[in-house]
Amino acid sequence: MTMLRRLLPGLLSLLMLAGCTGKVLQVSAIEGGHDDVVSSVAFSPDGKSLLSGSWDQTLKLWDAKSGKALRTFDGNTSKVNAVAFSADGKLALLGGFDNTMMLLDVATGKTLRTFRGHTRNVNSIAFSPDGKFILSGSWDRTVKLWDAMSGKELRTFKGHQDNVTSVAFSPDGKLALSGSWDKTLKLWDVATGAELLTCRGHILNVSSVAFVSVKATSSTAYKLKAQTSH
């Protein structure tokens, strides 16, 4: 299922499509919840809830079917750039303009910890598949690996020559992928921090990256997917 979002003040619009046919399954408009640009959205793993982050400095939890606002998370004091659910749906993560990330308990709304280490805006965040680690990409041109439970910074991946816009873990959690305004994708070894590959070819900024699993005989290979900004 694919979700598209419109970045308009005070309006979160969701268009849900069937992945194979492109058929529209549902269109929902959630109005009045945010007071500024909605910068990032994410489905919970079970598809029942949504997270939205906004430049109005709030993170909100929604019922995906009814569009009802379930919770507004307190404690954040900067514009939100990125949001993510943990694999079990119990934790929410946000990254913002204050160079930090916040980890929150979805059920209670409580802030569990704050991650500090970037020197510019945090643009993109991702949980590892097992939920133990977090990736973050920033305008400081770095990708960082964190311990999700302790908040400790474990590693910094350096190599991009411009803002890092998007980060992703491979499905097995062993590889990290990043995209940047330098028009490249970089593939990293999570365990060692080694840069394994740089992909060049885009003529515009890379705005989004993802892994796509491809079954090949007895093993699994990965394709890298990128989207550019217009």
Image (cartoon, rainbow, N blue to C red):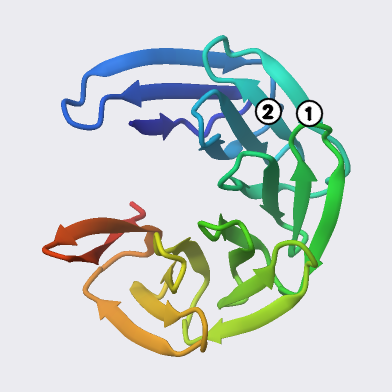
Label 1: which residue? Answer: 72
Task: Say how many tags the image has.
Answer: 2
Quarter of the figure with residue 187: bottom left
Label 2: which residue? Answer: 61
Q: Is residue 61 above or below residue 32?
A: below
Residue sitting farthest toward the left:
217
Label 1 vs 2, first from the N-terminus? 2
User: How far across and down, in percent of the image, does residue 6 sit?
Assistant: 46, 30
* Residue type for callout 1: Thr
Q: Is residue 224 above or below residue 95?
A: below
Name the side, left or right, on which 24 lies relative to 135.
Answer: left
Q: CA distance from mark 1 to mark 2?
A: 6 Å
Residue 191's disc number: none
Rate crowding at label 2 as few (under 14), some (14 to 19) or many (20 or more) other CA atoms within 10 Å: many
Quarter of the figure with residue 183: bottom left
Q: Secondary structure at mark 1?
A: strand
* Residue type for callout 2: Leu
Q: Is residue 216 above or below residue 52?
A: below
Name the side, left or right, on which 122 lies relative to 178.
Answer: right
| Image point (86%, 37%), residue name | 74
Cβ–Cβ under 8 Å for marks 1 and 2: yes
User: How far across and down, in percent of the image, does residue 1 sit?
Assistant: 33, 31
User: How far across and down, in percent of the image, does residue 4 sit?
Assistant: 39, 32
Quarter of the figure with residue 15: top left
| Image point (79%, 49%), residue name | 78
Q: Secondary structure at mark 2?
A: strand
**Front-lying residue, 191 or 229:** 191
Q: Is residue 182 above or below residue 35?
A: below
| Image point (32%, 82%), residue name | 198
